[in-house]
Amino acid sequence: MLTIHALEPNHWHDVERIFKAGILTGNATFETTTPTWEKWDNGHLRHSRWVAADNGKIVGWVALSPVSDRCVYGGVAEVSVYIDPEQRGKGIGTALLQKVIESSEGAGIWTLTAAMFPTNLASVALHGKSGFREIGYREKVGKLFGEWRDTLLFERRSKEII
């Protein structure tokens, strides 16, 4: 049975394990190593951090990062969502995104953004079905393992401001 819980420091081992699996695909992030808990914790908003558990085992996580420290962007955050590779395709990403949408709006976030590689078709589909719309394309925005990579930009506006 899938349950969603607040992400706590004691979940870090599983969060890092799932993040590392995403890194190893070469299709999820520009990161090449996982950070320490302290660095990860400081880089993410304190609210709207969730883990998905299936019969007690952590199988996915979602969290928000601020897009800027300028006050005008205080209601804009970037979504990170990662699913255990053995658990993909089971609706876990959808459940996590719905939870983070609900909690972020309750915390005053009016726009959620996401950037992903165009080749990450599962992430593109997940965000699309969760109410995000594609708003842009960044060509050769960064290198990963010596290769230039493009990203797609998605956003989702809170229903409160639409």
Image (cartoon, rainbow, N blue to C red):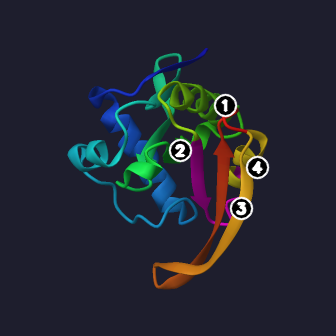
Q: Residue furthest left?
A: 38
* Residue name at image x 76 percent, y 49 percent: 125
Residue 8, relative to residue 83: is it above or below? above
Amino acid at dot 3? Ile
Chain-order first, disc 4 or disc 1: 4
Chain-order first, disc 3 or disc 4: 4
- Judging by the rendered image, the residue that carries numbered circle 4 is 125
Amino acid at dot 4? Ala
- Judging by the rendered image, the residue that carries numbered circle 1 is 160
CB atoms of marks 2 and 1 within 8 Å: no
Specify few, some or many for label 3: CA neighbours under 10 Å numbering under 14, 14-19, or 20 or more. few
* Residue name at image x 46 percent, y 39 percent: 63
Q: How many marks?
A: 4
Chain-order first, disc 2 or disc 3: 2
116 is within the stretch colored magenta: yes
* Residue name at image x 34 percent, y 30 percent: 11
Residue 89: % across, % down: 71, 39
Amino acid at dot 2? Tyr
Q: Nearer the viewer, mark 3 or mark 4?
A: 3
Specify few, some or many for label 2: CA neighbours under 10 Å numbering under 14, 14-19, or 20 or more. many
* SS of the residue under disc 3: strand
34 is within the stretch colored magenta: no
Residue 30: % across, % down: 46, 67
**Quadrant holding the C terminus:** top right
Mark seen at residue 135: 3
